[in-house]
Image: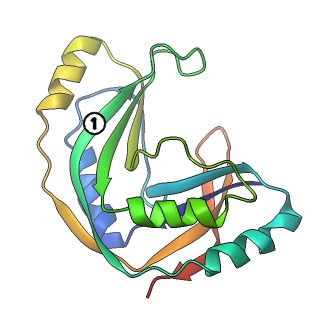
Amino acid sequence: MRCFVSINFSEEVEKEIRKIQSLLPKFSGKKTEPGSLHLTLKFLREVDENKINGIIDRLREINSEKFDAEIDSIGFFDNRKSRKYERQIIIWLRMLNCEKLQKKVDNSLKSLFEMEKRFMSHITIARVKDVKDKKRFLEELKKIKIPKIKFEVSEFYLMKSDLSKDKPTYTVLEKFKLN
């Protein structure tokens, strides 16, 4: 099963993110739906079901304090060089103050998974498949000013991801409280 470790958001934070999504210029593609918004701390890829309990045990050992996070800016990945995502643009929000927790997650799982080479704390809010005028679209995107969204992170999750043509479905396998 495909799994990842994430920070999920309250309805209040998701509501603020949806407001930002409504500011996006017109495009052909998909906005990330409510309930699917999250910040991936570590993508585990395909995991054998009999290894899940070991992953949960290691994640339970993480001793970390609750912390304040902040969504502070919008950006994009222009995947023009990737064949798989040819012409696709990923629009994201940058989230601050998650690096310590991400490193703890990474270290706790290092005997099972490769360490992250580069962590870029972001929340994918849309996947653009096509636009009429790409240059103009990106210029409009760069003009968007977003309000800072501050909130407390008091837990993180081990998630299962089921992919389908319509949309991914995420299921909580385990929730981990922060001190």
Give the residue at mark 1. Answer: 75
- The residue lying at 22 percent from left, 30 percent from top is 25
Determine the secondary structure under disc 1: strand
Residue occupying the far bottom of the picture? 179
Report crowding for label 1: few under 14, some 14 to 19, many 20 or more residues within 10 A (C-alpha): some
Apparent side of residue 45 relative to residue 103 in the rendered image (left or right): right
- Identify which amino acid the numbered label 1 is placed on: Gly
Nearer-the-camera pick, 7 or 33: 7
- The residue lying at 56 percent from left, 77 percent from top is 62
Apparent side of residue 170 relative to residue 99 in the rendered image (left or right): right
Location of residue 130 with respect to 121 vertically, above or below: above
- The residue lying at 44 percent from left, 56 percent from top is 39
Question: Could you say which quadrant of the image residue 1 lies in?
Answer: bottom right
Apparent side of residue 35 relative to residue 75 in the rendered image (left or right): right
Q: Position of residue 161 (x, y in %)?
A: 66, 54
Apparent side of residue 63 relative to residue 73 in the rendered image (left or right): right
Location of residue 80 with respect to 172 vertically, above or below: above
Q: Position of residue 52 (x, y in %)?
A: 78, 68
Nearer-the-camera pick, 69 or 129: 69
The quadrant the C terminus occupies is bottom left
